[in-house]
Amino acid sequence: MNIPNEFYIKVKQIYGEVGEDWLARLPDIIDRCSGKWGLSELVLLDNYTNAVLYGTSRFFGDVVLKIGMDITSEIKAMSRFNELAICHCYVADEPLGALLLERVMPGNDLTTISSEEERINIAANLMLHLSVFSDTEVEFPTYHQWIENDFNRIRRERTVNESMIRYMELAEKFFQEMQSLGRIPKLLHGDLHHENILQDRSGHWKAIDPKGVIGTPCLESARFIVNQVGRVPENEKSHSLATMANKFSGIFKESPRIITYGAFIDLVLILCCMYENNDDPRDILQSQAECQIYLDFIESCS
């Protein structure tokens, strides 16, 4: 199949030579998956850095084929989560970096729900049913590793402004405070934002695209909070953050301050990715400005 030029450019920009090598092998990987799993009518989706394709399998019906350079954690995580709370993985091939997944239909995501309160309730319910205690941490990265690796790489390889340096230092401080609470870590989705929560034909909501990361349970709410705050108008952001901090405080039995620590840490991790992906500087500055909203709320909790 033809791979769009925009997809090539995006992968090369983010992953460099490693991405270029993977792109050269991608058509063969797709052909091998098609032969093994009886795939046809494959269509590559836009706006992904993994190869994500809709298609039909003669064995499983409507499916999603996902191929990535480093999705080992996702492959392993798919079998660990509560199967009622996540899309089904029919089969995977770890050497190829490929998963064949249930296509959740109709697949409306959480952005289709207009009520913020309803969105939060749906996400909170899914979080409670999704994450699990892991029998081993060796197979999955930890939040500590995410922070250490991303921050060290940014400090070593990128020129960032003073605000970003300060935010990384604060994120490290907040994370240490969360760790000192001694909560038993769980296997978390790690990327549970609105577009990764889909509704099936029976009305149930399911998660897709887990990263698979070990962390303090309340960190599962972080990506959703950041995504929701980013969606509302400027004059509603502080209120939206406070609403979610209090809601997830009750869900995870943590203080609103601790919940907000997690969201702030996640926002700074997102900023690291924005720098590495060479995102528009205006978008980076906007996300940095949102960091202050979290810090103001944390200060109000003191």
Image (cartoon, rainbow, N blue to C red):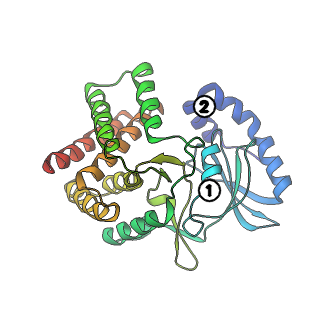
Left or right, residue 9 beside residue 26:
left
As drawn, 229 above or below 117? above
As drawn, 146 above or below 221? above
Residue at position x 48%, y 67% from top?
Answer: 129
Viewer-side residue, 50 vs 135 = 135
Residue at position x 44%, y 65% from top?
Answer: 128
Q: List the single residue furthest toward the right.
A: 35
| Residue 171, quarter of the rendered image | top left
Label 2 crowding class (10 Å Cα cut-off): few <14, some 14-19, many 20+?
Answer: some
* N-terminal-most mark, 2 or 1: 2
Residue at position x 59%, y 50% from top?
Answer: 46
In front: mark 2 or mark 1? Answer: 1
As drawn, 210 above or below 289? below
Amino acid type at circle 2 is Lys
Image x and y of residue 3, in percent: 70, 43
Tell me the CA gap for discs 2 and 1.
Answer: 27 Å
Residue that carries the numbered disc 1 in the rendered image: 78
Left or right, residue 265 beside residue 5:
left
Left or right, residue 69 beside residue 189:
right
Residue that carries the numbered disc 2 in the rendered image: 12
Amino acid type at circle 1 is Met
